[in-house]
Image (cartoon, rainbow, N blue to C red):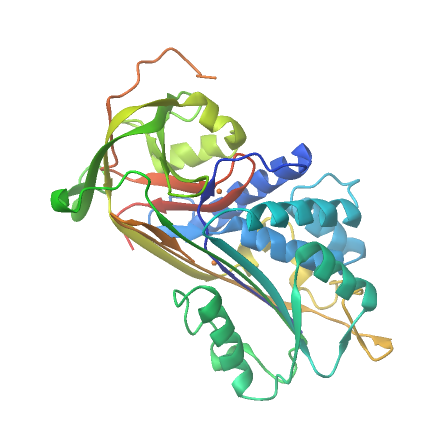
Amino acid sequence: MLKVLIFASCMSFNYFAFGQDSTFMQAQQSFALELYANVSGPEYLINSVLSPISVDISLSVLLVGSSGFTFKQLLNGLKYPANYSINFVQSNSNLLIKNMQKVGGLEFVTRLYLSTKYSLQNIYKSAIQKYFNSSISLMDFSDPTSVKTINDFVTASTHGMIQNMLDEGDISPKTALVLVNCIYFKGTWVYQFDKSKISQGNFRINKTNSITVDYMYMTAPVNMGTVDALKATVIELPYVNTNLTLTIVLPLSGYSLKNLMKAARSYDWRKVSNMLYNQSVEVTIPKFNATLKQYLNNPLINMGMDSLFNASATQFDHIAHDYGTSVKITLDYVLHEAVINVDEEGTTAAAATVSSARSLPPSFSATRPFLYFLKTSSTIYFIGQFTGQS
């Protein structure tokens, strides 16, 4: 029984990920958007947040230990071409992680907890340490304190933002392995919102209903523009001492989040920054936070990775052995939790050519449901939506 737990937090990046293959970067983008579409539901009605890069890296760690049909499903589910090899995934994942380590304010850690009953296969152990910078800890999963040990690690790695991730029933003596991935970012705005101007106002949930939220205001030189392909206005809000920006995507009047996500899934987000102008903008956005804790089994099955959870079909043959005998490992669940908080001081998160001559809006007012990305020019680290509904 293999349990995979994924905990994430991050912010958006606008720098080129040096050395990464363009096909690899496109695959990550496609995976991120499809996973989010499967997690958030067909109507995109409630506040949510997801770190697709954390899920991506964790599944890649499993891919390295897979074979046969499971390997093919993981390769396809992660949107890589069918002829791509484990070596390709390993080397590009390693370049991605090295780029993440260069970003100010970002913390990233992967740890594998292995049952004391088993031993990692040498090739697999070497690969996850070398390419994924993963630490390895032996654990007696029959010990009731094992849950607390893992929870304490997650809490420390996310600076207290994610607590009590696991319940007592999530671990059992039959557990063979637990994989934990944590990403944490805390950023301060380059251009501060004026605390004295925070005020309440209406946020329109839909055509007939609205709620009262706290709005933040500032005027600052930021990148903004209307992207015709998305039928949306896009703005990037930068952070101090880092390349990070919060990218907010507001559908044009008459368009919904559902319309936006349909367009977003086929859009090349690596080019969005080139479609924006740097200009002085009056910015109005709500203070908001979002939390998502969800088992990802069904979304991953919907994306064609059903063999991962099928005891008779799964093939994780290259991960562990019982001191000489290969261990039959079944993926029990994938659990993901992400937390984000956006206020006047900045953002804390736990779990990255103008298209037309349309005139640019002089202000950006996010007073209706919007999508946001925490991304680099090459990789989506976080994606979420604020709809005013929890």
Which of 301/239 is in front? 239
- Rendered-image quadrant of the C terminus: bottom left
Residue under the point 56% across and 39% down: 29
Which of 330/249 is in front? 249
The image shows residue 95 at horizontal and vertical percentages of 66, 45
The image shows residue 368 at horizontal and vertical percentages of 25, 38
Q: How many marks?
A: 0
Farthest residue in the bottom direction?
Answer: 143
**Image quarter for residue 206?**
top left
**Image quarter for residue 134?**
bottom right
Q: Is residue 389 above or below residue 145?
A: above
Farthest residue in the front direction?
Answer: 241
Left or right position of 301 against 342: right
Q: Is residue 191 above or below residue 93?
A: above
Residue under the point 33% across and 31% down: 251
The image shows residue 225 at horizontal and vertical percentages of 36, 23
Q: Is residue 331 above or below residue 102?
A: below
Residue under the point 27% across and 27% down: 253
The image shows residue 202 at horizontal and vertical percentages of 15, 42
Farthest residue in the right direction?
Answer: 324
Residue under the point 65% across and 47% down: 77
Left or right position of 198 against 256: left
- Rendered-image quadrant of the N terminus: bottom right
Left or right position of 170 against 327: left
